[in-house]
């Protein structure tokens, strides 16, 4: 498969503290890769480098063979905090994202795309509500819908379900997988949840604790999808292995 994202021998320092040691990784086209590790291991920093919101102290980060020098519409980002504009409705938040990323689209084209993604995430009935009138799960659905509407070739997820209750988290994980299976865009997700990493990923990259954090294991997830309700015999050994790495690294 073609490499979509390439992180080549990067480091990141703040003053005299090197928070990320020499680290390299490649993500293939259509792959779902999770960065798993404890707090302070540099997961979100690496994701922000791919998004073009942060830059390495040494080394390079590239997408589609071009070094990343800032944000771009080919890379959509979903935060744990949905980052919605509070004065805009759900529909208008999505439309604003579309207008920013794709100014060439007409108002009619944006409206059609917005209505389509609102339907996909089950929010057609709440399209005209502002964020204050949406639950946490609904707000995160809008954040996902905005990223889906932009139709970026790369989707970057920074612990998007970390603040949600267990039931809503499961619903949105299923929704993400359903839409990902439809178009197989390239996904990089930051998580500290072993179960979530196993459920969603093709590969899991395990980070060591910081400072001087780096990838200590690149694990391929060879478990048939869908994985909800998978037998302990299928997931147990991988779960124990990952927990062992996190506990003893």
Image (cartoon, helix red, strand yellow):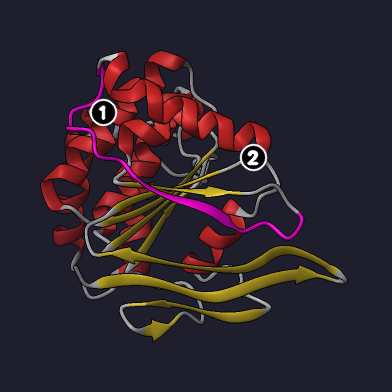
**Image location (x, y in percent) of residue 29:** 23, 64
Quadrant of image for the N terminus: bottom left
Say which residue appears at 36% left-offset and 39% top-offset: 142
Asked whether, in this view, residue 8 is left or right of residue 212, the answer is left
**Image location (x, y in percent) of residue 86:** 53, 41
Is residue 225 one of those drawn in magenta?
Answer: yes
Asked whether, in this view, residue 16 is left or right of residue 76, the answer is right
Kindly report which numbered mark, 2 or 1, lies closer to the viewer in this rendering.
2
- In the rendered view, tell whether residue 202 sits above or below residue 154: above
Say which residue appears at 45% left-offset and 22% top-offset: 135
Q: Main secondary structure of the magenta part?
A: loop
- In the rendered view, tell whether residue 175 sits above or below residue 155: above
Q: Badge 1 local density, few (<14 within 10 Å), some, or many (20+)?
A: some
- In the rendered view, tell whether residue 197 sits above or below residue 55: above
Residue at the extreme right: 16
Using the image as rendered, state which of residue 57 and residue 127 is in the foreground: 57
Asked if the residues shown at circle 2 and circle 1 are in contact, with their CB atoms under 8 angstroms apart, the answer is no
C-alpha separation, residue under disc 2 versus residue under disc 1: 24 Å
Is residue 11 one of those drawn in magenta?
Answer: no
Q: Is residue 191 visible?
A: yes
Dot 1: element: helix
For disc 1, the marked residue is: 174
Disc nearer the start of the sequence (2/1) = 2
Residue at the extreme bottom: 66
Dot 2: element: loop
**Image location (x, y in percent) of residue 233:** 29, 17
Q: Is residue 195 visible?
A: no
Which residues make up the magenta segment? 211-230
Quadrant of image for the C terminus: top right
Q: Badge 2 local density, few (<14 within 10 Å), some, or many (20+)?
A: some
- In the rendered view, tell whether residue 127 sits above or below residue 62: above
For disc 2, the marked residue is: 38
């Amino acid at each position: 498969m073609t490499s979509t994202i390439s992180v080549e021998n990067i480091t990141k320092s703040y003053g005299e503290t090197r928070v990320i040691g020499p680290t390299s990784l490649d993500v293939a086209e259509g792959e779902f890769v999770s960065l798993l590790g404890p707090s302070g291991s540099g997961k979100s920093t690496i994701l922000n480098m791919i998004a073009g919101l942060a830059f390495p102290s040494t080394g390079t980060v590239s997408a589609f063979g071009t070094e990343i020098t800032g944000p771009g519409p080919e890379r959509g980002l979903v935060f744990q905090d949905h980052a919605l504009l509070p004065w805009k409705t759900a529909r208008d938040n999505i439309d604003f994202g579309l207008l920013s990323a794709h100014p060439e689209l007409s108002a009619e084209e944006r409206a059609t795309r917005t209505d389509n993604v609102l339907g996909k995430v089950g929010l057609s009935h709440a399209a005209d509500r502002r964020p204050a009138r949406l639950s946490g799960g609904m707000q995160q659905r809008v954040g996902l819908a905005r990223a889906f509407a932009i139709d970026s070739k790369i989707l970057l997820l920074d612990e998007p379900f970390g603040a949600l209750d267990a039931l809503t988290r499961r619903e949105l994980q299923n929704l993400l997988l359903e839409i990902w299976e439809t178009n197989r865009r390239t996904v990089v997700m930051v998580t500290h949840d072993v179960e979530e990493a196993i459920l969603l990923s093709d590969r899991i990259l395990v980070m060591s604790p910081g400072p001087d954090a780096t990838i200590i294991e690149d694990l391929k997830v060879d478990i048939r999808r869908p994985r909800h309700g998978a037998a302990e015999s299928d997931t147990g050994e991988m779960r124990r292995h990952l927990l062992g790495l996190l506990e003893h690294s």
